[in-house]
Image (cartoon, rainbow, N blue to C red):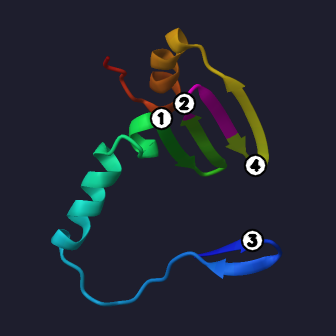
Amino acid sequence: MRSLTDGAWKNLYKFNLSPQEWVDFEPANYMNSTHPDSIFVQWLMVVLQNPSGKEVMLGDRFQSVSEGKTKGWTVRREEIPMLLLQKFSLRYQS
């Protein structure tokens, strides 16, 4: 994967075909899902790909991308459970 920074492409990471064991992924997965600085702990984050685009919930923002057009809005806290159910088929539990 590459990123365009200051007009020049920079490598972000690379892959190889070396066999990997679950133990190679477990510590990073644990840190990403539990560390207080992780965005996965700090924010509600849900992404659903669909044939025409995607639905994205990040914190209190919802975006719908369909056929190249984006619509987005801020969601009030009390609206989150219904939005998760309607757009992502997820039941909210507090």
Relative placement, left or right, of 2 versus 29 is right
| Residue 77, horizontal then vertical, whole percent | 52, 14
Label 4 or label 3, whichever comes before in sequence order: 3
- The numbered mark at residue 43 is 1
Image quadrant where one finds the N terminus: bottom right
| Kind of element beneath mark 2 | loop
* Magenta residue span: 58-64
Is label 1 in contact with label 4 (beta carbons under 8 Å)? no
Please identify the residue farthest to the front as the structure is shown. 37
Is label 4 in contact with label 3 (beta carbons under 8 Å)? no
Amino acid type of disc 1? Trp
- The numbered mark at residue 5 is 3
Frontmost of labels 1 and 4 is 1
Q: Which of the pair 35/48 is nearer the observer?
A: 35
Is label 2 in contact with label 4 (beta carbons under 8 Å)? no
Amino acid type of disc 2? Gly
Label 2 or label 3, whichever comes before in sequence order: 3
Q: Dot 2 corresponds to which residue?
A: 59
Which residue is at 32% across, 17% downward?
94
Relative placement, left or right, of 93 versus 45 is left
* In the depicted structure, whether residue 57 falls above or below residue 77: below
- Give how far apart the Cα atoms at labels 3 and 1 are: 26 Å
Frontmost of labels 3 and 1 is 3
